[in-house]
Image (cartoon, rainbow, N blue to C red):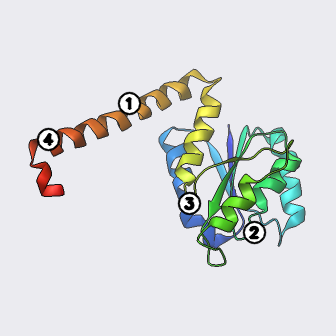
Amino acid sequence: MTKVGIIMGSKSDLPTMQAAADILKEFEIEFEIDIVSAHRTPEKMVDYAKTAHTRGLQVIIAGAGGAAHLPGMVASLTPLPVIGVPVNSSNSIDGWDSLLSIVQMPNGVPVATVAVNASQNAGILAAQILGASDKKILEKIITFKNSLKEKVIEASDALKSTSAKKYL
């Protein structure tokens, strides 16, 4: 059953949003992915947001650049948690405009927001939300977090085995 919806405002956002899809695949979480523009296809956006929970979705990841209205507009229309991904797009000011547009939502319309272009973190956060009530997903998250720790320990050991001066 599809649990996460990944949407973006433009086809050009797909390279950024791909990391969310990749990490959800790694966690074996079913998702759907689509282009839903708040400005160019507002009716599609409204329908998507209003029906997402009836289609079995439990979390929506919404990426947008520039004015980045998509995450907030979707959050205003759905009862589901929405995770916003600010995209540093061609019409963006290094992603800052997108970040501020997504993070500065009014009270009552929260959008969890990750760093600019950090859709992998959005995918991880979606998995953590689902993992709060799904033991299989929770175990995969625990394994993933442990692998992060192991990578740092391996890098630390490798650095210690060579001369630290080599890196300074």
Q: CA distance from mark 1 to mark 3?
A: 24 Å
Front one among 80 and 44 = 80
Near mark 4 (Cα within 10 A), the count class, few <14, some 14-19 or many ≥20, is few
Identity, as a three-letter code, of the amino acid under mark 2: Ala
Identity, as a three-letter code, of the amino acid under mark 1: Asn
Front one among 150 and 50 = 150
Q: Position of residue 99 (x, y in %)?
A: 66, 60
Q: Are marks 4 and 2 in contact (CB under 8 Å)?
A: no
* Image quadrant in which you'd find residue 29: top right
- Residue hosting label 2: 67
- Residue hosting label 1: 146
Q: Quick one: label 4 or label 2, which is nearer the N terminus?
A: 2
Near mark 3 (Cα within 10 A), the count class, few <14, some 14-19 or many ≥20, is many
Q: CA distance from mark 4 to mark 3?
A: 32 Å
User: Residue at coordinates 43% horizontally, 33% vertically from top-left?
Assistant: 145
- Residue hosting label 4: 160
- Residue hosting label 3: 117
* SS for callout 4: helix
User: Residue at coordinates 67% horizontally, 43% vertically from top-left?
Assistant: 4
Observer able to see residue 2: no
Q: CA distance from mark 2 to mark 3?
A: 15 Å
User: Residue at coordinates 87% horizontally, 65% vertically from top-left?
Assistant: 42
Q: Are marks 1 and 2 in contact (CB under 8 Å)?
A: no
Near mark 1 (Cα within 10 A), the count class, few <14, some 14-19 or many ≥20, is few
Side (left or right) of 74 relative to 100 = right
Identity, as a three-letter code, of the amino acid under mark 4: Lys
* SS for callout 2: loop
Identity, as a three-letter code, of the amino acid under mark 3: Asn
* SS for callout 3: loop
